[in-house]
Amino acid sequence: MAVAARLKPADLFTPTQWAPLSARSAWKGIALVVHCWATILAAGLLAVLWPHPLTYLLAVMVIGARQLGLAILMHEAAHGGLHPNQKLNDWLGEWLCAAPTGASLAKYRPYHLTHHKYAQQAEDPDLVLSAPFPTTRASLRRKIIRDLTGQTFVKQRFGPLAGKLRDRAPGQSAWDVVAAEIVRQRAFLLWNLGLLTALSAAGLWWAWLALWVVPMATWFPLVTRLRNIAEHALVARDEPDPMRHARTTAANPIERLLIAPYWVNFHAEHHLFMHMPCWNLPKAHRLLAAQGRTAGMLTAPGYLDVLKAASSRAA
């Protein structure tokens, strides 16, 4: 198997520069998790206190982006970046970040670390995400419509269960399959039951559907797709240069709010230094730029530019 080439931090930074860049924090990761949930709450309150189609649309977009934020912080936990105490790091990543959106840190970590080990090589399990690009504008438009209309959500959430029901073993009842799926998804179901119960107690039962499920079924799949496209679409297969295994995309304040929270746009730096805490990625980028090294990296001036390139194939 071809392991992706790597650079050593000492090749790019002095010891004085690297020490603060690589340092874990006992409070910053916790603060990010709190910030993510506080943003979700604030967006929900905005829609509840000032009901209007525009405030509701904004809330759906912000909450969906912060559901992606929870996935990003789970990703940070997969690299041990949320807290220097491994048990607390994993608890934060599993129960406050992964479980609310139906993910699993325990299952995600080995898969994701394999992606890093073989980034853009034949054994990279994430190649399937970038393989369709470049595509046509019509194809990208269809993908976006499927995301925003909930079709992607339904396929991802219920497709595996439908497949298991279809392919169940002789003598295995449909209930056995459903029961096993309930057990597998118990953390996600308990989180959502808790949210529904708490909102119902506040007289806002409908908010669980309108301000949690709808964002999860619409904006969350879309921004997840945009993230995947920006990170690895149009990146060369079997790329020998570790500076070009992923793309860093500049993000303005609106893009950071609605598309790319928690410095996820600095993906080239993340692949170079996968255990660097996410809040230090912008500083690493500035130091690399000062050395003139960002000229050799894959970068994009914005998400719209990436989408244009990713949909540049002629019909």
Image (spheres, rainbow, N blue to C red):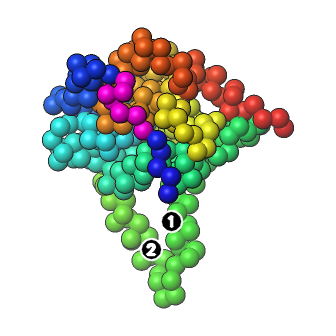
Q: Magenta segment range?
A: 6-12
- Tag 1: Cα neighbours inside 10 Å, few (<14), some, or many (≥20)? some
Amino acid type, residue under disc 1 in the picture: Leu
- Compared with 281, 165 (above or below) is below
Q: Quadrant of the C terminus?
A: top right
Nearer to the camera, 156 or 275:
275
Is 9 part of what is drawn in magenta?
Answer: yes
Q: Determine the secondary structure under disc 2.
A: helix
Residue 47 is at least partly visible in this image? no
Q: Which residue is mark 2?
A: 177
- Residue 63 in percent (x, y) is at 43, 31
Q: Residue at x 83, y 35 (%)?
A: 314
Give the residue at x 43% y 48%: 117
Where 122 sits versus 220, above or below? below
Q: Residue at x 57, y 40 (%)?
A: 239
- Residue 257 in magenta? no
Q: Position of residue 50 (x, y in %)?
A: 42, 19
Left of 244 or right of it: where is 261?
left
**Residue 21 horizontal side relative to residue 151, left or right:** left
Quadrant of residue 88 in the image?
top left
Residue 194 placement (x, y as % from top left): 28, 48
**Please, what is the three-letter code of the amino acid marked with disc 2?**
Val
Q: Quickly name the residue at label 1.
A: 161
Q: CA distance from mark 1 to mark 2?
A: 8 Å
Left or right: 23 in relation to 224: left
Numbered circles on residues, count:
2
Question: What residue appears at the point 60 percent right and 36 percent down from the top-left corner?
Answer: 235
